[in-house]
Image (tube, rainbow, N blue to C red):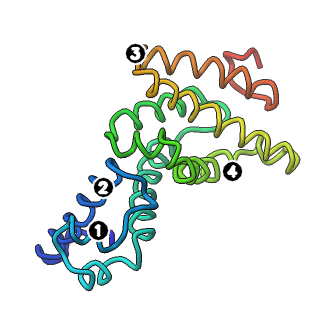
Amino acid sequence: MKLSGHEDLRVQKTIQSIRTAFSVMLLKEDYRKITVTALCRQAVINKKTFYRYYDSVDALLEEILSEFSKGYVDTIADYRVPEDLDKINAAFFHYAVHQGPLYEKILCSVSYQHLSSHLVEEYIAKSWGKAPAFQNLSPGEQELFTTFIHATGLSMYRQWVEGGKKLPVEEVIDITNKLLSQGVAGLLPSNNPENGQ
């Protein structure tokens, strides 16, 4: 249940308790093993209280994923694709770094890859999906293109995290920008003056 801030203080505390307990559990164990019973025990509430606010554990997770996705999509809302790909990539890394361990785990853990894919698919639909250059591609080219964007940025982030963040985030952004822009430039024309067009 998304809070508007106008709810009764007890409701706010209950929702916060559920979300905190869920976040703690997600960091400790595989999502598929989290049950409503275990979540209620962790949140110190009963099942009836949980079901008053959420239909299922999946609904709670979906809410959290939507908030993560919305935050990032809002951050890049004014950027144009493909012209601002470097800014979009930098925004992704900066956003991810500031979201904390739960976001990092969802993006990096093998058992959560289907969840992180959801975040990336939403971003692609709201950004690239509306870009005129992307619309000019055939459906087959669009599929390959979105796979490239999805796999490249996310894989680079995952590798950086799994490798212990040996490079400063700004250096990682610079490297991924070079790799992404060269790959994208091969398929999409750009009106970016830096590309000589």
For label 4, the SS is: helix
**Amino acid found under the numbered disc labelled 3:** Pro
**Amino acid found under the numbered disc labelled 4:** Lys
Q: Residues within 10 Å of mark 4 (few under 14, many from 20)?
A: few
**The disc label shown at residue 38, or none:** 1
**Amino acid found under the numbered disc labelled 1:** Ala
Question: Pointers 2 and 1 in contact (CB under 8 A)?
Answer: yes
The image shows residue 179 at horizontal and vertical percentages of 65, 20
**The disc label shown at residue 168, or none:** 3
For label 1, the SS is: helix
**The disc label shown at residue 25, or none:** 2
Question: Pointers 4 and 3 in contact (CB under 8 A)?
Answer: no
Q: Residues within 10 Å of mark 2 (few under 14, many from 20)?
A: some
Position of residue 192 relative to residue 28, above or below, is above
**Earlier-in-chain disc, 4 versus 1:** 1
Question: Pointers 3 and 2 in contact (CB under 8 A)?
Answer: no
Q: CA distance from mark 3 to mark 1?
A: 39 Å
Image quadrant occupied by the N terminus: bottom left
Viewer-side label of 3, 2: 2
The image shows residue 73 at horizontal and vertical percentages of 49, 48
For disc 4, the marked residue is 130
The image quadrant that residue 146 belongs to is top right
Viewer-side label of 3, 1: 1
Q: Residue at 50% of width from left, 49% of height from top?
A: 112
**Amino acid found under the numbered disc labelled 2:** Met
**Earlier-in-chain disc, 3 versus 2:** 2
Residue 60 shown left or right of residue 129 in the figure: left
Q: Residues within 10 Å of mark 1 (few under 14, many from 20)?
A: some
Viewer-side label of 4, 3: 3
